[in-house]
Image: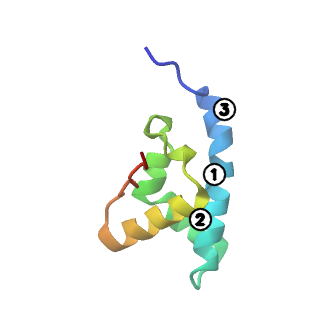
Amino acid sequence: MNEPFMTKEQFSSFLPLIVAPVVELISNNCNLSEAECALRFYKSNLYSELADENTKLWHYSALTLYHMYQDELLTGRCIYPEESA
């Protein structure tokens, strides 16, 4: 059985450190406040998946997560980037 990388409490503390730069990128590239961008991001499917440690989305860069968020806005789906071999 795979042991989790972090406890739930550790992951809950770590998640805002992942989200903040993504929200900043969203805010820098749209005409909305950072607070509004944060609300929208927290309501996204991407955030729901990011908040699940088992998806391992937390290991992607803020820029990759930003692009995934943009893809979700365009397609309505979370599209995982292909891993390079």
Read off the residue under disc 3.
10
Lateral position of residue 69 relative to residue 75, left or right: right
Report how far apart the C-alphas of labels 3 and 1 lie in the structure: 13 Å
* Residue 4, x across and y down, in percent: 53, 24
Quadrant containing the C terminus is top left
Helix, strand or loop under label 2:
helix
Few, some or many residues within 10 Å of mark 2 (<14, 14–19, 20+): some
Q: Which mark is residue 38?
A: 2
Report how far apart the C-alphas of labels 3 and 2 lie in the structure: 21 Å
N-term-proximal mark, 3 vs 2:
3
- Picture mark count: 3
Name the quadrant containing residue 74: bottom left
Few, some or many residues within 10 Å of mark 1 (<14, 14–19, 20+): some
Q: Residue at x 63, y 51 (%)?
A: 18
Q: State the residue in front, 57 or 12.
A: 57
Q: Are marks 3 and 2 in contact (CB under 8 Å)?
A: no
* Residue 40, x across and y down, in percent: 50, 67
Residue type, mark 1 in image:
Ile
Residue type, mark 3 in image:
Gln
Q: Residue at x 60, y 59 (%)?
A: 62
Q: Residue at x 48, y 66 (%)?
A: 67
| In this view, 7 is above or below 37 | above
Helix, strand or loop under label 1:
helix
N-term-proximal mark, 1 vs 2:
1
Foreground mark, 1 or 2, reads 1
Report how far apart the C-alphas of labels 1 and 2 lie in the structure: 12 Å
* Residue 57, x across and y down, in percent: 49, 46
Read off the residue under disc 1.
18
